[in-house]
Image (spheres, rainbow, N blue to C red):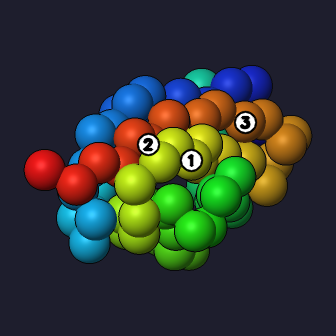
Amino acid sequence: NVTAISVSPATAALAPTDTEQLTVTFTPTTPDNTTVTYTSSDETKATVNASGLITAVADGEATITATSADGGFTDTCVVTVATP
């Protein structure tokens, strides 16, 4: 059974249209169920797909949350989007 998850990177600074791939580490490292659901706190700033790929949309900040199907454990990545 999963007892915790950790998302990497914990923060990301992106320009609009840039992408960043999240990596989830499980505790223990080899659980039976590695299903994770990703959500964005503000999809007008950054979106995330089912495999954890973040796409920056517009200037601002969004928090991406990863939630494990086994146990409902969560961790986050704070995404800051800024036009260079």
Amino acid type, callout 1 = Ala
Quadrant for residue 72, please give it: top right
Q: In front: mark 3 or mark 1? A: 1
Can residue 27 be seen in this snapshot?
A: yes
Q: Nearer the viewer, residue 76 or 15?
A: 15
Counting labels gives 3
Neighbourhood count class around disc 2 (C-alpha, 10 Å): few under 14, some 14–19, many 20 upward: many
Helix, strand or loop under label 1: strand
Q: Nearer the viewer, residue 77 or 60?
A: 60
Residue drawn 79% across the image and 55% down it: 69
Residue drawn 44% across the image and 42% down it: 79
How far is the residue under mark 1 from the one under mark 2? 5 Å
- At which x and y percent is residue 77? 50, 37
How far is the residue under mark 3 from the one under mark 1? 16 Å
Q: Would you name the residue on which mark 1 appears?
A: 62
Q: Are marks 1 and 2 in contact (CB under 8 Å)?
A: yes
Q: Would you name the residue on which mark 2 appears?
A: 79
Residue drawn 28% across the image and 40% down it: 13
Neighbourhood count class around disc 1 (C-alpha, 10 Å): few under 14, some 14–19, many 20 upward: many
Helix, strand or loop under label 3: strand
Q: Earlier in the sequence, mark 1 or mark 2?
A: 1
Amino acid type, callout 2 = Val
Q: Are marks 3 and 1 in contact (CB under 8 Å)?
A: no
In the rendered structure, the answer to whether residue 7 lies left or right of residue 64 reads left
- At which x and y percent is residue 82? 29, 48
Q: Nearer the viewer, residue 63 or 21?
A: 63
Q: Would you name the residue on which mark 3 appears?
A: 74
Q: Earlier in the sequence, mark 3 or mark 1?
A: 1
- At which x and y percent is residue 61? 51, 44
Amino acid type, callout 3 = Thr
- At which x and y percent is residue 22? 39, 50
How far is the residue under mark 3 from the one under mark 2? 16 Å
